[in-house]
Image (cartoon, rainbow, N blue to C red):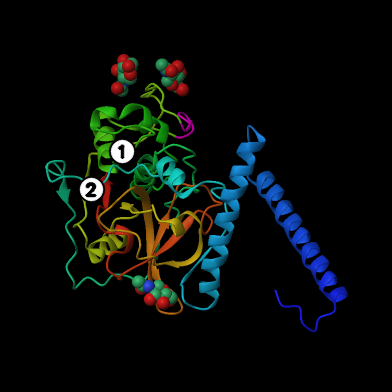
Amino acid sequence: MQLVGIPLRIVLVLAVVSSVTAVALYSVVLDEWEDFKVEHGKVYTSDTEEAFRRKVWMDNKYFIAHHNQKYYNEESSFKLRMNHFGDMLHHEFVSTMNGYGGLRTSDDLRDSSLFIEPDDSVIMPDSVDWREKGAVTPVKNQGACGSCWAFSSTGALEGQHFRKTGELTSLSEQNLVDCSQHYGNHGCHGGWMDSAFKYVRDNHGIDTEESYPYEHVDRQCRFNNSTIGADDVGYMDIRRGSEDAVKKAIATVGPVSIAIDAAVRTFMHYHTGVYNDTDCNPHKLDHGVLAVGYGVTEDGVDYWLVKNSWGPHWGDNGYIKIARNQGNICGVASAASFPLV
Ligand SMILES: *[C@@H]1O[C@H](CO)[C@@H](O)[C@H](O)[C@H]1NC(C)=O
Ligand SMILES: *[C@@H]1O[C@H](CO)[C@@H](O)[C@H](O)[C@H]1NC(C)=O
Ligand SMILES: *[C@@H]1O[C@H](CO)[C@@H](O)[C@H](O)[C@H]1NC(C)=O
């Protein structure tokens, strides 16, 4: 290092100042880490575990800050935020949270019927939000269990039951997790919404959330026919890959179950804005969610309004806006369906 012209005294002062800044910065980060642990109730079994989790959290913090810089520079249409997944590696997150069984083969689709789309002369509203009509229960939390498919199914059933009876009844995901194995579902290890609708049809009902609460683990079936909250007589698939058909179904039928690719790192930390990360693959479906509406932002960007099951602290109070009419981003229209009640 060349120190020509700089008196040694100043060099020393500079060195002291910069190390003081580093220490101060580090203690701010440590305080933030303590706050993170308290806010999300994190408890670690050893110092080694904690040191590892802190490293992962710092890496996620950097990733979020880096992305948000792009958001502020208007190079991204969505913003990220630290949340309760902040101490998880992305692949850990993917393996515990995503439980949609993937695209079905044509064999599986044999006994489904197709949603008959209203013809183009029927004018659809520019925006729909079924929450405003009272058809959507509060955001739920699947916990560390790959039961997204069960939450997507109850969400669609809750909506259809509401439309039929005028009553919004929260339905039991645990009932589906515990009892629908014969339909190809694997509880906390994944499943399909259509299989859940078939189970409910053959079982002549699904219990209420209140009578059969969620436990985020696989247990024995305890369905009780005296506490049924809703029923269905089958389901309809929406034309594969057609965003227009999904729009028509939401406008005329209600909230619909959709499967998406959520195994993208930005998805884990989504906060607000219109999500349009093209790293997600419309043919690699791994997460079941509920489309409760659609709309257009003030800037003229079309979006889907999607309810997730990762609690209200994820995303925008538990919801995400996904870009619409931009080539089936994340596979929103790849495997959409709804139950018939
Ligand atoms: C996503 O949004 C950003 C910001 O509006 C834009 O620059 C980008 O082109 C969009 N990406 C896609 C795939 O539409
Ligand atoms: C089913 O639910 C009813 C009403 O809550 C209750 O009285 C009954 O004991 C339950 N049956 C079983 C087998 O748990
Ligand atoms: C409810 O379940 C009980 C016990 O399994 C059965 O005896 C009864 O017939 C069922 N009732 C109805 C309405 O299905």
The Cα atoms of the two marked residues, 1 and 2, are separated by 11 Å
| Residue of label 2 | 103
At a point 72% along the width and 52% down the height, the residue shown is: 30
Using the image as rendered, state which of residue 233 and residue 290 is in the foreground. 290
Q: Residue furthest right?
A: 9
Image location of residue 16, percent across then percent down:
83, 66
Query: Do the residues bearing badges 1 and 2 touch, measured as CB atoms within 8 Å?
Result: no
Q: Main secondary structure of the magenta part?
A: loop
Quadrant position of the N terminus in the picture? bottom right
How busy is the neighbourhood of tag 1: few (under 14 within 10 Å), some, or many (20 plus)? many
Using the image as rendered, state which of residue 220 and residue 48 is in the foreground. 48
Using the image as rendered, state which of residue 306 and residue 164 is in the foreground. 306
At a point 31% along the width and 38% down the height, the residue shown is: 191
Would residue 56 be found to the left or right of residue 99 on screen?
Answer: right
At a point 56% along the width and 60% down the height, the residue shown is: 81
Q: Is residue 218 magenta?
A: no
Using the image as rendered, state which of residue 14 and residue 177 is in the foreground. 14
Q: Is residue 34 above or below residue 250?
A: above
Three-letter amino acid code at the position of disc 1:
Gly
| Residue of label 1 | 191
